Amino acid sequence: MQSRSLKVASRLTVPAVLTTVLLWSWLKPAQSAPGTPPSSATSVALARVQRVSVVPQLDAIGQIEAGRQVLISPEVAGNVIHLSFDSGQSVRAGQVLARLNDGPEQAQLTQLQAEFTAASARLQRQRELLATGGTSRQVFEDAQVQHDTARAALEHLRAVIAQKYIKAPFDGTLGLRQVDLGQHLDPGAPITSLTDLSQLRVNFTVAEQEGGSIRQDQGVSVQVDAWPGVAFSGRISAIDPRIENTHTISVQAILDDPDRKLRPGMYARVQVALPAREALLIPETAVAYSAYGEFAFVARAGENEALTVKRINLRIGEHRDGQAQVLEGLSEGQQVVVSGQLRLRDGMAVRPVASALGI
C-alpha cells in the first residue's frame, strides 16, 4: 500500500515541476545583447547639438521716408493767376510752379523805382556840393536818409512781389495738384507736395538692451510688402543718443534704391546684421513647450548601453531657418529628440529610427 502511494505521488510531482519550469521560462525577461534596445523602446528621431558660427540679426519694424519732402504753399495771400505744373511732374530747384496776382504791387513798383531814382540823383548833387562847400553837411545827410529810405521801400516791395511766385525749393517730384486757376489762397495753404526720391531712409527703433550691438555705417536689409522677396540694402546713418520712455532707441538708415521701387510712407521689415559669434543650434522641432517654459528630451546611453531620455529645461534664443539657438541647458554633441516627444517620459527607453541616423 505504501509503495503504491509513492508511485502515485511520483506521477503527480513530475508534471507539476515541468509545468513550473516552463511557466518560469516564459515569464522570465529576455536578456538583450549589450547595446540592443529593449523591444518596448519608443522609436524617435534624434539630432545632435551643433556649435556653429552664426551671424545673428536684429529684427525691427520701420517706416520709409524721403530725404527731403515738403508741402508747397504760398507765404502771402492772393489769387492764382498762373499755374505751370502738373501732378507727378519732375521739377528743378527754383522752378516757378504758380503765380499769385501781383498787379497792385507791380504798379507800386514803378512809383518806388521813380522815387529811388530821384533820391539817388539828389544825393549825388549834394555830395558834389558838399565837396566844394556849396551845401551843409546837414542837408547832405538828409539827402542820404531819403535815398536809403527809398531804396529800402523798393527792396521791400520787390521781396513782396517775389513771394507771389511760388517756386520749388529743391529738385524732386511733385505730388497731386491741390489748386486751380483763379483760386484764392491763404498763407500756408498747400498746393502740392514735393519729394526728393534720390535718397530714401528708414526710421526704426531697437530695444534698449540692443543698443550696444548697433553702430553707424552698420549694414541693414529692408523688405516691404509691395516687393515680396526683394531685399533693399542700406547702412545706419544716425543713432539717437536719447533713450525714449518706452526704453527704445531711434535709429535711421539710408537705403539704396537705384530703381526707385520704394515710396515714402511704406512700412518696412528691417534686419540689422550683428557681429558673428559661436552658437549652439538644434532643430526647432526639438523644442517643446509647457507652462514652465521650453524643454527638450536628451537621449543618453543607459544600462546595457541602451538609450534613455531625460527632460532638460532650456533657454532658447532666436529662431531662424528652422534652427533654434540654445542659450542654456545643452552642450555640444548631445543628442536631442526631434520627433515623438509627446509619448516620452523621463527614463523611457528609445530606439533611433533609421531616418534619424547621421543627423
Image (cartoon, rainbow, N blue to C red):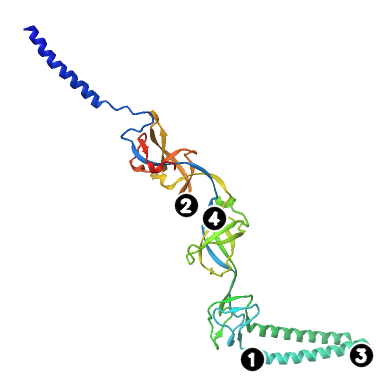
Is 259 placed left or right of 339 in the picture?
Answer: right
- Residue 341 picture location, percent across and down: 36, 42
Mark 4 and mark 2: Cα distance apart in space: 22 Å
**Rendered position, 107 above or below 25:** below
Q: Secondary structure at mark 4?
A: strand
Q: Residues within 10 Å of mark 3 (few under 14, many from 20)?
A: few
Single out the residue that lies furthest toward the top: 2
What residue is rendered at 86% in x and 86% in y? 140
Amino acid type for the residue under numbered disc 1: Gly
Label 2: few (<14), some or many (≥20) within 10 Å?
Answer: few
- From the image, tell me which residue sits under label 1: 103
Q: Which residue is mark 3?
A: 134
Instruction: Say whether residue 338 is visible.
Output: no
Tell me the SS state at disc 3: loop
Q: Vertically, is 305 above or below 183?
A: above
Q: CA distance from mark 3 to mark 1?
A: 43 Å
Q: Which residue is mark 4?
A: 206
**Image side of residue 149 versus residue 320, left or right:** right
Q: Is residue 230 above or below residue 2?
A: below
Q: Is residue 342 above or below residue 261?
A: above
